[in-house]
């Protein structure tokens, strides 16, 4: 499971309905991103909006439908 923000690919440790926890957060302003998920060989991708961006000091990132 990972989050693509532009050219960055960030590993997701956990995901909830309106948030995710990144393995190693980086600073990023509010933007659109794409989540990639693979479960039992089934892959899925979808667009999300990061309304508050990503803060280096916090692994938690709010997400919203894009």
Image (cartoon, rainbow, N blue to C red):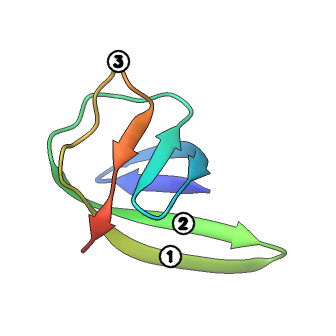
**1 or 3: tag closer to the N-terminus:** 1
Could you tell whether 59 is left or right of 62 in the image?
right
- Give the residue displayed 36% in from the left and 43% down from the top: 61
Q: Which residue is mark 1?
A: 45
Residue at 34%, 18% (x, y): give it. 57
Disc 3, disc 2: CB below 8 Å?
no
Q: Position of residue 50 (x, y in %)?
A: 25, 54
Q: Position of residue 59 (x, y in %)?
A: 45, 30
- Find out whether the residues at labels 2 and 1 contact each other: C-beta distance under 8 Å: yes
Instruction: Give how far apart the Cα atoms at labels 2 and 1 are.
Output: 4 Å
Q: Looking at the image, is 29 positioned above or below residue 64?
A: above
Q: Nearer the viewer, residue 51 or 4?
A: 51
Q: Position of residue 12 (x, y in %)?
A: 56, 46
What residue is drawn where x is 66% and y is 78%? Answer: 43
Residue 57 is marked as: 3
For the N terminus, give its image quadrant. Answer: bottom right
**What residue is disc 2 on?**
36
Instruction: Describe residue 62's horizontal placement relative to residue 12 as left or right.
Output: left
Foreground pick, 2 / 22? 22
Which type of secondary structure does the marked residue at label 3 adopt?
loop
Give the mark nearest the N terminus, 3 or 2: 2
Q: Quadrant of residue 40?
A: bottom right
Numbered tag placed on residue 33 in the rendering: none
Above/below status of 44 relative to 27 = below
Seen as rendered, the residue at the extreme top is 57
Q: Where 44 sits versus 58, above or below?
A: below
Q: Is residue 4 left or right of residue 51?
A: right
Q: CA distance from mark 1 to mark 3?
A: 27 Å
């Amino acid at each position: 499971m990972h989050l693509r923000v532009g050219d960055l690919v960030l590993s997701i440790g956990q995901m909830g309905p309106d948030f995710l926890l990144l393995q190693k957060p980086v600073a990023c302003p509010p933007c659109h991103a794409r989540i990639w998920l693979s479960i039992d060989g089934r892959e899925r991708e979808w667009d999300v909006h990061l309304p508050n961006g990503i803060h280096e000091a916090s692994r938690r990132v709010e997400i919203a439908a894009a």
